[in-house]
Every structure is written in structure tokens, then in C-alpha cells.
Image (cartoon, rainbow, N blue to C red):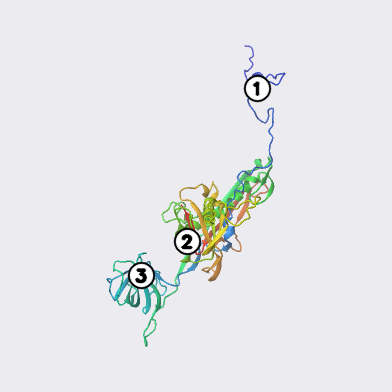
């Protein structure tokens, strides 16, 4: 049987004597081994600009070490006590009454953890109806206090007696005291009321790996990095981006973290220990701070309500608004509208109508009772992060400037701390603020049989939000 030639690979293409496309000389499969090689750019194009979002905590906070799994601090309570959920046992027109206090009471340190009202015999009180349009109020003197029943007896100064009904909910606060001549003084004392808060650090990890074979194939690329460095990177480019991503995680974890609730899935993930979570800034402000919901404040009346609330809290003079782009525009438009010529957006401030001048249509801050400075927060604008969220969106946060004095449970003394600061685990032998190490048998590492280089990142930290009652969260 005669030998046969295989039908593949078939005949070769026939070149043409002239530059024309024929069925016999048309190349359909294009690759780098064929006729043409591509022109390449050695510099990477930065189409997303600076992609890192870690900047917020560096601007407003500080970092300090901690040696414990639990961080505790005490914040001052109110100097004066006011109860807003009270009711009289007497009808309108009565000269005396027994007032029942239904507010949540703070346990007293001198009564073995039991709760009691912080009023004393001989003090003078103002009692007012909680209805906004009402003018029903009385002033009286306390004649008896019952800690077990959470009630106090009051004798009114007004001859007409009690002005509100027995079913009305009223508010009460002490404004002074009065004692007759020759009587004993006050027989009870009121202990200072502190609020104890705590937070737990969480461990944050990241990793990058590259095989030894890939490291042997050098491919350079010129980059400009988010941390300001410029130059050429080899396979380390991905490691560099992993590092930047990890640094973003360090900040985002402190902002977004939530504690694991009892019987939650996170608690049950690793047996009896589980993942405990942590109290991030958004969580703390949402639970212990102030929340402006329903969109952005776009009128001075909206900010007046915010200022009124701040008056009732710490009354911090200077505050910074970290906001998204739309919120920034809303504030600009609100302030521009205060100018009588600003309806068309042409006169936001004083200028000489110079044709060479670029009109500034934005504001950096304003003063109305307090100083408010605003700045765009990239984290809220980034489409791959908070900027891409519609439901439950957070538009901004108001952060008080400066520091506050708290009692540090670990140090055992008062200490001045920024309102926002990070505590990281550290001791004389172990610093877990920002750890990184390399394992493997490639890239200079020679501590493992693995034919690769693995870069690990780790941090253990928690965010302490002091005086959350001075913060505002702006949500949809």
C-alpha cells in the first residue's frame, strides 16, 4: 500500500506580487508572531486617578497603642438632671401632687446598683407640659422622695395649684432649693453620673503571592502610585496595589465595622469564640450620636435644626463636614441663595467682574452660630465603594474639631484625646499597628520550600469615637 501524505497542515499561503488582498494571501489569524508587532506604551495610564480612599482618619484622628483586648473609657454625664417622661397623680387645680418618673434611671453607685431619681427634699423644681403649644407649667418644692417607687412629692408655689391634668406627660428639672430658718440641711447626696463605653480591636489581614517562575520573566511598567512614588515596577506592581488596598481596609474597617449581635451568624462561625466585630464610626454615631435623615439639609432652616441640636450637646465651636459631591453642591447653592444677586448663580461673592477671572462657585465653609467647614470625602464618592450605594446611602458626617478630656480606664487618669482616634495592639515585643512579612523561596525569601514569594499584611486595631453626641450622620 503506497504511503499517504497527511492532509494537514495543507498548503502554505501564496504571496501576491502586488499589495492586494487575495484569497491566497489573506492572514486571518493575527498574533505577535505574524507580520506586524504592536506599538506599546511603557507607562500605565491612570484612568481612575488616585484610587485610594484612605485619608479621613489621618486628617481628623490619631493613633496610639493599646495592650488589651478591650478598650474602655468614661465620658461625663450631664451636670443637671431632667426627666421628660413624668406624670402627676393629682388632678388639675391640686396644691400638692405625687410625680411618678418613668424615665430610664441610672444606677447609683452608693445604692448597690439600684436605680433612683436624682431629686432631693428641699429642692425647687420646674414642671412643664410636653405639648409644644401648651403654656401649662408649675414651680414647686419637693417635700418627699421615694427611691423604691421612683416618685417625689411636690408642693406648688402657685395658689391656683396644678395647671396640667393627671394624664398629661410632663418634664421636670431642679433649678434650686429653699429651706426654712432653723432647719437641717440636705440629707442626701447625688453621685456624679458617668457613661462607660468600650470597644474591641479586630484583626485585619491581606496577602499577595507570586510564583518564582513569574518572577523570572521580567516585565517592567512605569507607574505613578497613589502614595506619590513614580518609577518602574516589575512583578511587584500587584504587591504594591495589595498594600494600598490593605491600607484602605485599615480605614474602612474603622468606619464601617459593627459588633456581632448575640446569636448572629458571625458569632457562630468559629465555635465558642466567633467573630466579635467592632464599633465603627458609622455604627457609633447611628446609635449614640445625631442622625439627619431624609436627604441633605438644603436650607438654612435645616441647619438651624442641626445647630439647635448641637446647642443641647457639647456645643463644639468648630466642626468639619466630610460629605459627598451632591451634598457639597447643595451647601454651595444654599449659601449662594443668601446673596441678593445670586438667584442666577452669577454673584457668589465679591469680585471685580474681571473677564480674565475664573468665577468661584463654591464655598469652603460658613458660620451660623458655629463654624462649619466642608470638604469632599472621596470614600463617599467612589463608585466602587459608598458612592455606588443608593439604598441606605450615607451622604456625609459632621465631626467636631479638637480634642476632649476623658477618664482612661487603663491609664487610671484623665487624658486628652481627639474625638476620633485609633488604638492598635502593641507591647514591648509585638507591634501590631502595621505588620508585614515575606515567606517562600523566591524573591529573596528563603524560609519555606514553596516555590513562590508570599507577602502578608496584618493589623489589629479599634476606633474610639469619643463624645458621639457631638457628631452628626447625614443619611437618605
Q: Residue 3: x, y in percent? A: 64, 14
Q: Earlier in the sequence, mark 3 or mark 2?
A: 3
Q: Residues within 10 Å of mark 3 (few under 14, many from 20)?
A: many
Q: Is residue 282 visible?
A: yes
Quadrant containing the N terminus is: top right
Q: Secondary structure at mark 2?
A: helix
* Separation of residues labelled 1 and 2 (CA atoms): 75 Å
Within the image, what quadrant is residue 66 found in?
bottom right
Q: Which residue is mark 3?
A: 128
- Number of disc labels: 3
Q: Residue 433: x, y in percent? A: 59, 58
Q: Closest to the observer: 232 or 49?
A: 49
Q: Earlier in the sequence, mark 3 or mark 1?
A: 1
Taking the spot 38% from the left edge, 69% from the top edge, the residue there is 83
Q: Earlier in the sequence, mark 1 or mark 2?
A: 1
Q: Which residue is mark 1?
A: 26
Q: Which residue is mark 2?
A: 304
Q: Is residue 449 visible?
A: no
For the residues carrying marks 3 and 2, which lies nearer the camera in this image? 2
Q: Closest to the observer: 278 or 355?
A: 355
Amino acid at each position: 500500500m503506497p504511503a499517504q501524505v497527511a492532509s494537514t497542515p495543507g498548503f502554505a499561503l501564496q504571496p501576491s506580487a502586488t499589495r492586494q488582498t487575495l484569497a491566497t494571501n489573506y492572514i486571518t489569524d493575527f498574533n505577535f508572531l505574524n507580520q506586524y508587532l504592536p506599538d506599546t506604551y511603557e507607562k500605565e495610564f491612570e484612568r481612575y486617578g488616585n484610587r485610594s480612599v484612605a485619608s479621613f482618619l489621618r486628617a481628623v484622628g490619631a493613633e496610639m497603642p493599646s495592650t488589651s483586648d478591650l478598650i474602655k473609657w468614661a465620658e461625663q454625664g450631664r451636670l443637671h438632671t431632667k426627666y421628660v417622661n413624668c406624670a402627676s397623680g393629682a388632678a388639675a387645680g391640686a396644691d400638692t401632687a405625687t410625680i411618678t418618673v418613668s424615665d430610664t434611671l441610672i444606677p447609683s453607685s452608693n445604692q448597690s446598683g439600684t436605680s433612683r431619681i436624682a431629686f432631693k427634699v428641699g429642692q425647687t423644681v420646674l414642671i412643664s407640659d410636653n405639648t409644644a403649644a401648651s403654656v401649662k407649667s408649675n414651680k414647686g418644692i419637693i417635700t418627699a422622695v421615694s427611691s423604691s417607687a421612683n416618685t417625689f412629692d411636690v408642693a406648688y408655689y402657685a395658689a391656683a395649684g396644678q395647671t396640667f391634668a393627671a394624664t398629661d406627660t410632663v418634664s421636670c428639672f431642679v433649678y434650686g432649693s429653699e429651706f426654712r430658718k432653723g432647719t437641717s440641711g440636705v440629707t442626701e447626696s447625688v453621685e456624679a453620673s458617668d457613661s462607660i463605653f468600650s470597644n474591641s480591636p479586630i484583626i485585619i489581614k491581606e496577602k499577595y503571592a507570586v510564583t518564582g517562575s513569574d518572577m523570572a520573566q521580567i516585565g517592567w511598567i512605569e507607574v505613578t502610585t497613589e502614595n506619590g512614588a513614580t518609577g518602574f515596577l516589575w512583578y511587584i506592581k500587584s504587591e504594591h496595589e495589595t498594600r494600598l488596598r490593605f491600607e484602605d481596609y485599615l480605614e474602612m474597617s474603622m468606619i464601617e465595622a459593627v459588633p456581632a449581635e448575640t446569636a448572629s451568624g458571625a458569632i457562630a462561625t468559629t465555635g465558642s469564640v466567633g467573630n466579635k466585630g467592632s464599633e465603627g464610626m458609622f455604627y457609633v454615631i447611628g446609635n449614640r450620636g445625631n442622625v439627619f435623615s431624609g436627604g441633605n439639609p438644603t436650607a438654612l432652616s435645616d441647619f438651624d435644626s442641626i445647630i439647635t441640636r448641637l446647642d443641647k450637646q457639647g456645643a463644639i465651636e468648630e466642626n468639619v463636614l466630610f460629605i459627598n459631591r451632591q451634598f457639597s453642591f447643595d451647601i454651595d447653592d444654599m449659601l449662594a441663595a443668601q446673596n441678593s444677586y445670586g438667584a442666577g448663580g452669577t454673584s457668589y461673592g465679591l469680585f471685580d467682574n474681571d473677564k480674565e477671572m475664573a468665577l468661584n462657585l463654591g464655598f469652603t465653609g460658613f458660620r451660623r452660630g458655629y463654624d462649619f467647614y466642608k470638604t469632599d470625602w472621596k470614600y463617599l464618592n467612589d463608585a466602587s465603594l459608598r458612592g455606588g450605594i443608593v439604598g441606605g446611602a450615607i451622604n456625609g458626617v459632621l465631626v467636631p474639631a479638637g480634642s476632649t478630656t476623658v477618664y482612661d480606664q487603663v491609664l487610671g487618669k484623665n487624658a486628652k484625646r481627639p474625638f476620633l482616634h485609633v488604638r492598635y495592639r502593641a507591647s514591648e515585643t509585638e507591634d501590631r499597628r502595621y505588620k508585614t512579612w515575606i515567606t517562600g523561596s523566591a524573591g529573596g525569601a528563603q524560609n519555606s520550600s514553596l516555590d513562590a514569594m508570599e507577602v502578608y499584611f496584618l493589623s489589629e486595631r479599634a476606633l474610639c469615637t469619643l463624645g458621639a453626641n457631638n457628631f452628626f450622620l447625614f443619611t437618605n
